[in-house]
Image (cartoon, grey):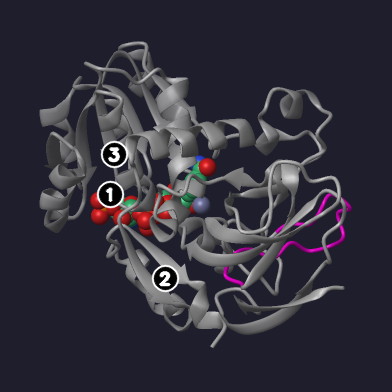
Amino acid sequence: MNQKVSAYAAKSAGAPLGPFDFEARSPREDDVAIDILFCGICHSDVHQVRNEWGNSQFPMVPGHEIIGRVTETGAKVQRFQSGDLVGVGCMVHSCQSCAPCHDHLEQFCEKGPAFTYNSTEMDRKTPTYGGYATKIVVREAFVLRVDPVLDPARAAPLLCAGITTYSPLRQWNCKAGDHVAVVGLGGLGHMAVKLAASMGAEVTVLSSSPAKERDAKRLGAHGFEIVRGPQDAARLAGRFNLIIDSVSAPHDYNAYLSMLRVKGVMVLLGVPPEPMPVGAFSLIGGNRRLAGSLIGGIQETQEMLDYCAAHKIEADIEIVPAQKINEAYERMMKSDVRYRFVIDIASLKA
Ligand code: NAP
Ligand code: ZN
């Protein structure tokens, strides 16, 4: 039997989110039904609710940092049972047969993965609804194990902010002795600081918010610099092996590229709505590299969750009821986030 779900949704681009009910499918043989406990608020939720990337579908139930408990499993499910603590990230399915899927890079599925929200199931008809909701039904292959040593609310942001920062640190072999800069101390940025520091790197936060300095050090950063434009770049020229850029708004990439050492790499994670120019000289000088990275595959997400459990790495969060989601969005727009808002889904059940 289909199950009634209480959620928060945006009904049109930029409209405030409000209560919304829908029905989740009854679990099929390979499905896991989950009662959601907590869901993080990612800046990608804000971009998509406001249709800043031009691909939004409404009504939209955002949310791809989902932690919950299994309530029911289909007959063929082997890895989970009722009561297990589990996570769901940015994807709920992919074709599972193309080359990227075979390489555990389902986010680049050639048919296009089924993203957790603002997307469709692989039938390309059924809309997907995310984690600002009481329940979700997901195929076993896209459900992650969450070690109970992790606090469920503080683990929720690992499902996007965690994997999105862990993956490029691994791709670019972050290690002891590396000088890593993290641009933007928000949800992604604060996870990048914790993860890079845990891998032994010397971490510097490049922020536009002077009030975040003390927190940056507490999170594991060794250095903190206010950077608001090219005028601030000169004193940091040639300093870093790796720059992780998590800024959600337009900013001058060339200024940050100048802070790379020879053969240094700057990885773009943030997705400002407008394109930004990169001068050829910014890359030619010093054989510098500009790269991007999109979340991470399911296998790597599990690896990251297990790494965080082993190193006791969790997000720093502010728990909010669903009724405060719109306020949380406004605060994120002002960089006033410390460092991830997480929705207590019990507030939707009242
Ligand atoms: P967030 O929590 O809102 O943090 C963004 C941070 O960027 C802010 O806290 C602020 O840090 C800095 N910032 C914001 N506006 C700025 C401006 N005008 N100038 C300079 N710095 C500014 O956002 P998030 O959830 O971490 O997401 C960050 C970006 O990553 C978003 O664009 C999101 O869509 C994207 N994202 C990408 C992926 C991926 O797979 N690549 C995954 C998830 C999210 P300071 O106060 O320290 O300056
Ligand atoms: Zn996200």
At mark 1, the secondary structure is loop
Three-letter amino acid code at disc 2?
Tyr
Q: Position of residue 222 (x, y in %)?
A: 13, 34
Q: Is residue 177 left or right of residue 289?
A: left
Q: Is residue 78 left or right of residue 183?
A: right
Q: Is residue 125 left or right of residue 183?
A: right
Hey, which quadrant is residue 74 in on the image? bottom right
Q: Between residues 164 and 335, which one lies in front from this camera angle?
A: 164
At mark 3, the secondary structure is helix
Can residue 277 be seen here? The reply is no
> Per the image, is 306 magenta?
no
| Sooner in the amino-acid sequence: mark 3 or mark 2 | 3
Q: Which mark is residue 194?
A: 3
Q: Predominant secondary structure in magenta?
A: loop
Q: What residue lies at 74% left-to-right and 29% top-to-bottom?
A: 101
At mark 2, the secondary structure is helix
Q: Assess disc 1: are there few (<14), some (14-19) or many (≥20) residues with their C-alpha within 10 Å of its C-alpha.
A: many
Q: Assess disc 2: are there few (<14), some (14-19) or many (≥20) residues with their C-alpha within 10 Å of its C-alpha.
A: many
Three-letter amino acid code at disc 1?
Leu
Bounds of the magenta span?
A: 119-133
Q: Which mark is residue 185?
A: 1
Which quadrant of the figure contains the C terminus?
bottom right
Q: Tell whether label 2 touches label 1 (CB within 8 Å).
A: no
Measured Cα–Cα span from mark 1 to mark 3: 11 Å
Q: Which mark is residue 70?
A: none
Q: What residue lies at 46% left-to-right and 63% top-to-bottom?
A: 41
In the picture of the structure, the residue carrying the numbered disc 2 is: 329
Q: Is mark 1 within 8 Å of ligand 1?
A: yes
| Sooner in the amino-acid sequence: mark 1 or mark 3 | 1
